[in-house]
Image (tube, helix red, strand yellow):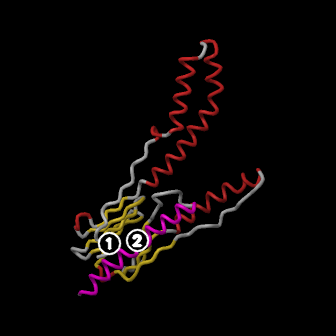
Amino acid sequence: MGIAALNSQKVRKPSFFRSIRFWIVVLVIGWILTDSNPKDTAGFLFMWTLPAFFLLLTAYVSYTHKRANASTIDLLNVNNNGLWSHEFQGSKMTIDTNRELLTLEANKRKKAYKFSDVKGWRYHLANGGEIVALDMVGMLGSKGHNNLTRLKNFENSGFFIQVRDIECPEWQIKFHPRKGRFHHERGIRDTEMQLKQWCEIFDQTLIKCTATQ
């Protein structure tokens, strides 16, 4: 296989305490406590409260995005063991070329299918539909709309697998960018590359195995 050399793909787990903004807040508080006049300490700490709050808030938002970036688990034919798996947010798919089985998990449902019962696969990446506002009132009104639109785009995106199963004829496996945010160009490109990679993995595993039968 052209992709047999791929191994497990890991993203370094983020830590909130490695944030530069977090340490700026800590260092400034330390400086106020150690170097300022005791009479002025309370006033300096009070003035630093608001900037510190925004720094910590933006640091936490950045941390949550990085944590999401690192939450995908892909194990791609590690040591040529014949297993290919992708897992994100409770959805998972595992190709077992040794037993010629595809195991799918989503929405607390789990089933295994023979390769011959897999009818097809595709991916869909929804994006767009957001509102751009230039005035303060418009910006406040568009925020809720844009957040809802981004959530819908994410929920409608993923890798879709059609199987011979009356109860569940199509499965959706979730994907998330390893770099950038889902609704930004960098994140969209990264997610699409992952989805195309898995289309190629399915092409080279399921089709090859069924063709030799």
Please tell me which residue lies in front, 130 or 194: 194
Give the quadrant of the C terminus. bottom left
Q: Which residue is drawn at 26% across and 82% down?
A: 209
Q: In this view, does 182 lie to the left or right of 101?
A: right
Looking at marks 2 and 1 on the same chain, the residue that comes earlier in the sequence is marked by 1
Q: How many other residues sit within 10 Å of disc 1, few (<14), some (14-19) or many (≥20)?
A: few
Give the percent coordinates (x, y) of residue 125: 52, 70
Locate residue 95, reporting x and y percent.
Answer: 30, 71
Q: Which quarter of the image is occupied by the N terminus?
A: bottom left
Which residue lies at the image location 50% right of the left edge and 51% below the top edge?
65
Could you tell me which secondary element the residue under label 1 belongs to?
A: loop
Looking at the image, is 1 positioned above or below residue 29? below
- Determine whether, in the image, residue 113 is placed left or right of residue 50: left
| Residue 212 pos. (x, y %) | 24, 86
Residue name at image x 32 percent, y 78 percent = 204
Query: What is the chief secondary structure element of the magenta stretch?
Result: helix
Say whether residue 179 is magenta: no
Q: Disc number at residue 108?
A: none
The residue pinned by badge 2 equals: 197
Q: Is residue 101 above or below residue 61?
A: below
Residue 42 is drawn in which quadrant?
Answer: top right
- State whether residue 183 is above or below residue 41: below
Tag 2: residue type?
Gln
Q: Residue 3 carries which label?
A: 1
Question: Image quarter for residue 24?
Answer: top right
Q: How many marks on residues?
A: 2
Between 111 and 6, the one nearer to me in the picture: 6
User: Cβ–Cβ below 8 Å for labels 2 and 1?
Assistant: yes
Q: Could you say which quadrant of the image residue 43 lies in?
A: top right
User: How far apart are the two marked residues, 2 and 1, measured between alpha carbons?
Assistant: 9 Å
Q: Give the range drawn in magenta.
A: 184-212
Q: Where's residue 91, x and y in %?
A: 40, 63
